[in-house]
Amino acid sequence: MRMIDAQLHEPSIWLDWSDVSSELKRRLLTEVALAHLETSGLERALLFATDLDWGREAAAAHPDKFALVVRGNVIAEDEDIEAQIEQAAADPTIVAWRLVIGYRGSDPEAEINRLNAGVYDRTFAACERHGMPLFFFMSRRLTRAAEIVQRYPGLTFIIDHLGIPQPPLDPRDVPPFKSLDELTALAAFPNVGVKVCGAVALSEQPYPHADVWPALRALVDAFGADRLLWASDISRFAGKIGFHGQMGGVPTDYDGKHSLFDSLRFILDAEVLKQEEKEGILGGGVRSMVGWG
Amino acid sequence: MKVVDAQLHELGPRLDWPDDSPARHDVLSEILFAWMDAVGIDAVVIHPHDPEYGQKMIETYPDKFAGVFGPGDLDAPDLDANIQRLRERPGTIGVRASFGKLLSDLTGEIAEAKFRAGTYDRLFAACEEHQMPLFCAAFGRCDLVDEVAQRHPDLTLIVDHLGMAQPPFHPRDTPPWAKIGELLALARHPNVAVKVCGAPVLSGAGYPFADNNKYLRQMIDAFGAERLFWASDIGRFHGRLGWENGSAPVGQAPYPGKHSYAESLFSIRESRELTQNEKELLLGGTVQQLLGWPAQ
């Protein structure tokens, strides 16, 4: 099976590397990202690099293993954002864009205001024009997401993190999949896919987390497996991204904590999925929605 | 439950680093932590390619790493004192000797000749004297372990790698578990335990290696789970042994039974054939009780 992790930030670094060159730091990140793939039998990963220099370097050096997703919030108001997106669309190391709206860590009210004020309209339009898929972080805002995806039928949207709040950065809803119907309703729009990330953190049972299987099945029934993209985003669950140290707000232990392989095997061992559905979620979704891999 | 992997060599890098990079120990550590984190391993018995590196890890992270080291020169006049010194060194929980088939000795004849010539006898006596557990890399030669167990009833012996020939370094026996009888026969010696390592490469079925279950059950019936413990030795299976990736050509090529780190762990952790108590013993409890580490 050709498996892809649809979200990897810089992998966690544990030792103190503060006195080495930035070149050596980037090299180390690439080494550990390659280990991330090999531990788990993954073929590829989409890099959500906070350090774009690293992300570009890794994707350029290992184009068969890594490609880059660019976070576009801050640059959305740049005068030349259209040109930036056009240029990125021609860059083989960049395969998608990302907007983070419904994330508590980044002031979602301010982001919603920016969204409503039309700040991101130029980004949407340019991504649509240049065939740039967009990862769209809209947890708790799925009805608002539905309004937007309708306006850009030619733009591929991928709803980040199931659109559902997850530990450790957000408390679970009660019940955890309270807004599942809002999510599956988005399947009516053929330009929408879902990043299946953090499902394990929504489980209230031990492995194999069978309590999440009904939601997983509902997603496959609504979207089909080739519009679903499994992602580990494992640094969020471990609470460390690259050299940044422990992430603010992430306790070292919490309910829902899991390993990369708990996340991956949760899909592989899900008894409610057929083999070809697992292949879709674990790689087919990235190939069809992002056009990479 | 703390999960202990009872054998890892430090895993090698993928990029071309300068051989003498001053960062090499730290790079090895980051790679090691990445593998442990990916799968969910709390503690590791390291059998280091670079003993200086291994010792550094044990001293820096005494709760995460303990070591099994080579015994040094078997002909050294002070072998006994060396073993005693190792025994007294915190974090050294065993020494290891090879007297089975090796890549350089595929039939095991050279090892057997050395064994018969008494090359290891002083080591056995010293380990017995100083209560140092001895890991026996006796691929295909459980009969030799049997002799040692009989002669040294107070020596704790660990049969490495099930005592069986395993890819990628050895071709499988036909059938792969042909030597299970010899392994099980060792259970009559109360001083013998088994490192359950490499079972996936003896399977013909792929994960979760269901065809191995009956052999695992036979081992539990014979030894009891309190004399069995799991180890991945995953660097061997991936061709990532040490900074130089010395085993890369054989380990990185395809071969029967090649498996991932997590498949090795999850075939035990998520087995439907094992009880919770058996899992806890295999994945850490036995190491803790038998080798005294990690602290409860």
Image (cartoon, grey):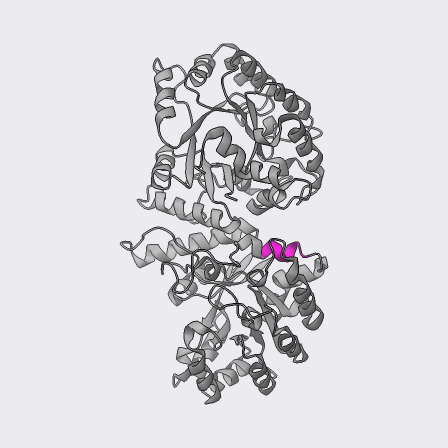
Is residue A269 magenta-colored? yes
Pick the front one: B14 or B123: B123
The residue positioned farthest toward the bottom in the image shown? A117
Question: How many numbered callouts?
Answer: 0
Q: Quadrant of the C terminus of chain B?
A: top left
Q: Is residue B263 above or below residue A65?
A: above
Is residue B247 magenta-colored? no
Instruction: Evaluate whether residue A42 shows in this view.
Output: no
The residue located at (56%, 53%) in the rendering is A261
The magenta span reads: A264-270
Asked if residue A217 lies left or right of residue B125, the reply is: right
The residue positioned farthest toward the left in the image shown? A19
Q: Is residue B291 above or below residue B262?
A: above
The residue positioned farthest toward the top in the image shown? B117
Q: Position of residue A149 (x, y in %)?
A: 59, 83
The residue located at (45%, 71%) in the rendering is A70
The prevailing secondary structure element of the residues shown in magenta is helix
Pick the front one: B110 or A146: A146
Q: Position of residue B170 (x, y in %)?
A: 59, 30
Q: Position of residue B260 (x, y in %)?
A: 57, 46
Instruction: Evaluate whether residue A157 shows in this view.
Output: yes
Q: Quadrant of residue A183?
A: bottom right
Q: Position of residue B171 (x, y in %)?
A: 63, 31
Pick the front one: B194 or B170: B194
Q: Is residue A122 above or below residue B96?
A: below
